[in-house]
Amino acid sequence: MALLGLILFNIINGIAVLVLISIGLAVIYGMMRIINLAHGEFLMLGAYATVLSTNAGVNLWVSILIVSPIVVGLFGLLVERCIIRFLYGRLIDTMLATWGLSLFMIGGITTLFGTTVEGVSAPLGAFNIGPYHASLYSVFSIAVAAAMLGGVWSVLRFTKFGLIVRATMQNPPMAAALGVAPNRIYMLTFALGAALTGLAGGVLAPVAGVAPGMGAAYIAKAFITVIGGGAAIVTGSGLASALFGTIDQIVTFQTTPVIGQVALLIAAIIMIRILPQGITGRFFRRSL
Amino acid sequence: MSGTALLQASGVSKRFGGVTAVDTVDFSLAEGELRCLIGPNGAGKSTFFKLLTGQLAPSTGTIKFRGHDVTHAKTHEIARLGVGIKTQIPNVFNGLIVRENLYVSAIRINKPARARAIVDEVLARLALTDIADRLVGVLAHGQRQWVEIGAVLAQEPDLILLDEPAAGMTHEEVARTAQLIREINRTKALIVVEHDMQFIRMIAKQVTVFNQGRILVEDNVEHVLANQAVRDVYLGKRAA
Amino acid sequence: MSPLFTGRAGFALVIAAGVIVTIALPLIDGMFGLVQATVFIAMAVLALSLGFIWGFGGIMCFGQSAFFGLGGYAYAIAAIDFGGSSWAVLLAIAVPAAFAAMLGYFMFYGRISDAYMGVITLTVAVILYNVMNSTSGSQYHIGAAELGGFNGMPSVPPINLPGDPSAALSPLQFFILSMILLMAVYTGLRLLLASRFGRVLVAIRENETRAMLLGYDPRFYKLVAFAIGGGIAGLSGCLFTNWGGFISPTAFSLAQSAQIIIFVLLGGIGTLLGPIMGAVAIEYLITLTGTQHRFDANLILGVILLGFVLLVPQGVVPAIAAQLARVIPARRRAGASSQTVTAP
């Protein structure tokens, strides 16, 4: 019974991690149809922001919840202004450019800080599920993931910004005719996606090996989740995270995390054969 | 009817969401027949062509070509059975030269030497020889249309569908196209979608009129052009 | 893309240049230079593999390193287990080709978009990277070959004369073999592109709908091209593993995949000679900067990739098309026949 509870907790945690690492990518993809290949490096930057500011004396929670999203959000803004905005409508070129950015960031961080950095340890300690220990910090990351999903959904559903964003994504010329500046919306959307990714990187920092190449450990899962989810941001990444998180954790429990990743990939590849547009391309089309 | 029909569409419908673009159409074409499809914009003619060539799957109904059920066949499978189509917007290989556009078409079932001979023959027949080595992407719209017709001919299909072959052509070119269609019809069946009534008069025997996804009238050309219902929905605007 | 390099005369010229390099380089360059040149050749073969599927098949593969790495590992494992290199070389081509065919089946028959294809192939490479990284320890072995995790597999037996495992090739012989294989792949691809298959493949790249309307199944043609590209990338991995006697998960890395893309972008999409040149140029540049140790190689690759995309403002592909349009009239004046697949 306790073992089942532990597995269940691990599954929920696995789902939460997928939500964390994919929601920023999903926001940018869902709203702008841009696949940011530097996504893993945005996560890495978020993790570095938390680690470096904590090491410089800032409170860990402040680093995670405030410093990381702001740093990466601003960086995203800069990237949008300097690179992305020249490439709208050229999907493949955007992917190549963000790929170049990803390499540039890995190389840049390596040049500045070397290949390793002194990490921060996970706070909060553990709690018991029967005879098993589970990390309280995982509960925190589950809460952050849930808050992210809820937050993005609320912004899209209830705010004027959300309405404008949805209108712009549906029909940019029409939105422009109504006095919306699509350029500004794209810029803010990209920055928002980057900030969410930065927050995720901050949350991961205490539990991940923070290094310039750490993005590679996450992007495969993030891409699979976003492609599997399809265009609807919240419903898509939520459902895909639930599906793939469950598969991942069950296989990981039976074997190793890497085999879990392989299982994810196989599931995703079979899925694109059946649902090329992702879950929300076929079902829940009108969801957010 | 079914014994002699080359193409037989029975009760074919296509719905897009709430819109019914093609509505329970029964259509039959005999071997060697030349049929014109007319009707106002949005009557469902191009959608019907897409259903016939497998680019869309019908919501209901069946389509048979030479007795083969091709209702849910893939586009390339239908093409292999002997259906060629010139689409409304020129669908050509822009990055290849004219000669190669035709060659790719002829090489599917022929050996290279035979394919080259077919290409030369079609080039000459369509008076494209002078521009045979030009990149198709840089040609004018009318010329690209000819290239597409050439590709369809080089494919040597038994049934040729032409979607607005005379669109954007000069008077002289229209006359030439009509002449060409009559010539092709000596050996092959054709279905031609056209708006130009002059052109229809030049080529048509049997005419099928589409309106709002349904077949309104099907008769010989004189009767159709004299039909009041047809005039109301379609001709009234142009040739009254 | 100059008229000089197209057509039969161009082909003869390229092969003649290859033969001259094969003969002259060992005479003028020292052993170190020759060994260096050999890895350039391995990379040139890799560049050809992507140049073919991307430039002529229109297939966006962002994870070509997957096949490169698989080829390298397949060779290393087979060479250790079988004790000779002939089967190992064949497996280094067959395993990635089969893997590409399998992956391609799901991608092409699922009809996913170019962008998704890029992401999926990239993801496959990343996951292979993660998998191979996790194989540290003696429990991960295939036959006698330990996979070695992130440390990779050292002391891989080199290619030997067929049937005689003790007769390992010398660096000079291996250089010559690599050159011959590069020229063979180049020639093979040119012949393939001039064949019915190649013409249909290019036609599909130009207009998939029209190709279908003519009776061709684009999924099948792309699948075959993708598998061929996978096999060639595998051959490159085999050469690379032989070159250092070593293969590690880095072969699957994103930086490796990006490098291949850069080879092709720099050299020119839609050509075969271009990617070869691009590979040699980039490898040379990396060798230069590598000896400085001031910058990380990623930094330089990133700048090149970014700069290339941003500074060719109308987009990479249209730029090439425009270039083509300029070249075609020149070729007409030169009396081009129906030999029009522009594969220098």
Image (cartoon, coloured by chain):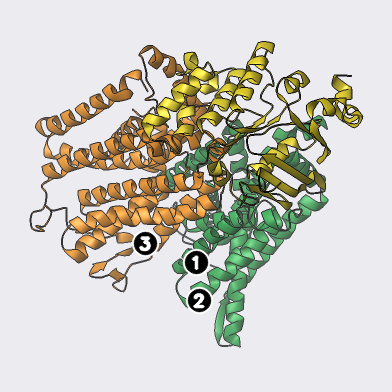
Chain colours: A green, B yellow, C orange
Quadrant in which residue C150 is drawn: bottom left
Q: Residues within 10 Å of mark 3 (few under 14, many from 20)?
A: many
Cα distance, mark 3 to mark 1?
15 Å
Which of label 2 and label 1 is nearer to you? 1
Up-down: is A128 above or below B220?
below
Q: Which chain does the numbered disc 2 sit on?
A: A
* Side of B41 where C214 appears, left or right: left
- The picture places residue C213, in percent across and down from the top left corner, at 57, 38
Q: Are marks 3 and 2 in contact (CB under 8 Å)?
A: no
In the image shown, does B4 or C290 lie closer to the viewer? B4
Q: Which of pointers 3 and 1 indicates the residue nearer the eye?
A: 1
Q: Residue C132: percent from the left, percent from the top?
A: 36, 61
**Would you name the residue on which mark 2 appears?**
A253
* Mark sitting earlier along the chain (2/1): 2
Instruction: Tell me which amino acid carries mark 3.
Output: Met
Instruction: Answer whether residue A107 is visible to the viewer in this image.
Output: yes
Specify few, some or many for label 2: CA neighbours under 10 Å numbering under 14, 14-19, or 20 or more: some
Query: Is residue C205 rendered to the left or right of residue C4?
Result: right
Mark carried by residue B150: none
* SS at mark 1 in the image: helix
Residue C171: x and y, percent? 13, 45
Please give the residue where the numbered disc 3 appears in the rendered image: C132
Q: Type of residue at label 1? A: Ala
What is the number of the mark on residue A263?
1
Query: Do badges 2 and 1 share one subunit?
Result: yes
Residue at x-position 60% and y-position 27%: B186
* Amino acid of disc 2: Phe
Helix, strand or loop at mark 2: helix
Q: In this view, does A118 lie to the left or right of C171?
A: right
Residue B181 versus residue A127: which sits nearer the camera?
A: B181
Question: Badges 3 and 1: C-beta atoms under 8 Å apart?
Answer: no
